Amino acid sequence: MLLWRVLSALALLAMGGIHLYLRFHGTGGVLGMLFLLNAAGALVLAVAMLVARGPLLRIATSLSLLFVVGTLLSLVLALTVGLFGLRSSLDYELAPTTLVVESIGTIVLLVTTVLVFRPSDPSSGDGWSQ
């Protein structure tokens, strides 16, 4: 379980790092502010993935999954039909990388969420269940 929590935190940090990079390398206005908020949210959720326990871990994991899926969906919408009046392209800086990172992040967080909500076996004695 610890491995999946660390992988989830890394996925969140990678996603947030991409948005932070894009914010400070040309993306301004409202979209730039949203990218900055995305980076801050990713950092908070990554820390929560590592330090939360019990019911708070379930909340953190669920919110993290929704956050990554929402960000991925936003990018897909921007690439296809447009979002907030903006249309993106795979030719834009880091767009393909972002698609890959957010897709992998979605899978990792989905697995982590399933593991966190799985009933733990107290007899396993591994000490890593949550």
Image (cartoon, grey):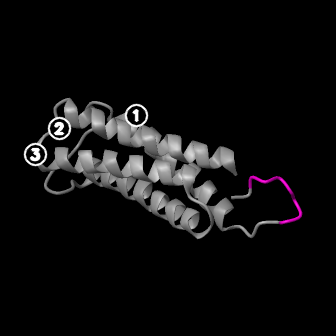
Give the residue type that dot 2 points to. Thr
Q: Secondary structure at mark 2?
A: loop
Residue at the image point whose x is 53% and y is 60% from the top: 61
Earlier-in-chain disc, 1 versus 3: 3
Q: Is residue 47 visible?
A: yes
Horizontal placement of 1 versus 33: left or right?
right
CA distance for labels 2 and 1: 16 Å
Residue of label 3? 29
Q: Look at label 1 and name its amino acid.
A: Thr
Q: CA distance from mark 2 to mark 3?
A: 7 Å
> In the figure, residue 29 lies in which quadrant?
top left
Please state which of residues 107 and 58 is positioned toward the viewer in this rendering. Answer: 58
Residue that label 2 marks: 27
Task: State the SS at label 3.
Answer: helix
> Magenta segment: does it hold 4?
no
42 vs 25: above or below = below
Q: Residue at x 51, y 67 (%)?
A: 59
Q: Residue at x 13, y 55 (%)?
A: 85
Asked if disc 2 and disc 3 are in contact, CB closer than 8 Å, the reply is yes
Numbered label tally: 3
Residue 23 image position (x, y, % from top left): 22, 37
Describe residue 5's horizontal placement relative to residue 35 as left or right. right
Name the amino acid type tagged 3.
Gly
